[in-house]
Image (tube, rainbow, N blue to C red):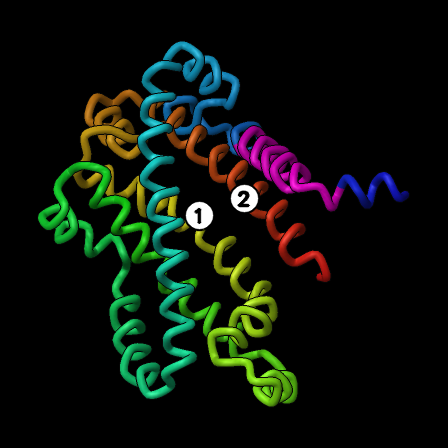
Amino acid sequence: MVAQRKLMASPVAPVVLGIAVLLAVWEGAIWLFGIPPFVLPSLGTIVQHAFTDTGRLTGALLATLGEALGGYALGGLLGLLLAVVLLLVPPLERIVMPLAVAVNAVPTVAYAPLFLIWFGLGAASKIALVALAVGFTMLVNALHGLKQADLAAVNLMRSFGAGPLKIVWRLRLPVAMPSVVTALRIGVPRSMIVAIVGEMLGAYAGLGRMIYESTQQVDLLSVWSAVLVASLASMVFYGLLVWIDQKLVWWR
């Protein structure tokens, strides 16, 4: 029983469970509804094709991961820093938050043409898009978490001469960690989606570019291979975040 609990608490468990569910739903749908291979090929066929195209898939995956991780880190950091600034300067929150909500009300990919013009077809435009998508999620969650610190504890630290930044570092940030990690988890699929869609609209490399070119050539196995690789990479990334969550928010 203890071993089972440890296994379920392991960061590997969500990844393995996600892959198992994906396999069951995929193969079950093909068998149950009799879906033809040109619509939805079996996972075995896709994996076999992926192994014959390892070089192209690896290069595309590395390009997309670089953009997704770069934008993810940048957006998470900027969102957290902005949340701290808004906490310390309350009047600024009343100005910035409506603007942030207005910007986020438009799907991030709608900004892709502008970002491609501003930053070019290289990785910079996709990193900026991902940062925009992840940054808002981090801003909202982190600001909410920072405000959850007990007022009595804040006043106690002030009575001992602690300044605003020290209170944030010593008290508010640890209290906000569950909200921050939640924002990081939400940002995982968003970062991959935005990076891939941005690549489909304009890029020199990446899974999105590969999907676009393969669709133009009606090479559906290559399309599914790229989709499968992107899904597996996201699952591994999410499992890593679960492990980080257990280390940073150990009291949950």
Q: Is residue 11 above or below residue 145?
A: above
Closer to us: 59 or 194: 59
Q: From this viewpoint, which residue is outermost toward the left?
A: 117
The amino acid type, in three-letter code, at marker 1 is Pro
Q: Quadrant of residue 208?
A: top left
Which numbered disc covers residue 238?
2
User: Does the magenta segment cover residue 13?
Assistant: yes
- In x, y percent, where is residue 112? 19, 50
The residue positioned 63% from the left and 45% from the top of the image is: 243
The residue positioned 61% from the left and 52% from the top of the image is: 245
The residue positioned 36% from the left and 28% from the top of the image is: 62
Q: Quadrant of the C terminus?
A: bottom right
Which numbered disc covers residue 189?
1
Q: Secondary structure at mark 1?
A: helix
Q: Is residue 81 left or right of residue 124?
A: right
Q: Circle 1: is it few (<14), some (14-19), or many (20+) Cα within 10 Å? A: some
Labelled pair 1, 2 in contact (Cβ < 8 Å): yes
Q: Is residue 138 above or below residue 69?
A: below
Q: Circle 2: is it few (<14), some (14-19), or many (20+) Cα within 10 Å? A: many
Mark nearer the N terminus (1 vs 2): 1
- In x, y percent, where is residue 81? 39, 65
Q: Is residue 167 left or right of residue 208?
A: right
Main SS class of the magenta portion in the image: helix
- In x, y percent, where is residue 213? 21, 26
User: Does the magenta segment cover residue 184?
Assistant: no
Q: From this viewpoint, which residue is outermost toward the right?
A: 1
Q: Is residue 201 above or below residue 28?
A: below
Closer to us: 96 or 203: 96
Q: Is residue 22 left or right of residue 13?
A: left
The segment highlighted magenta reads: 8-29
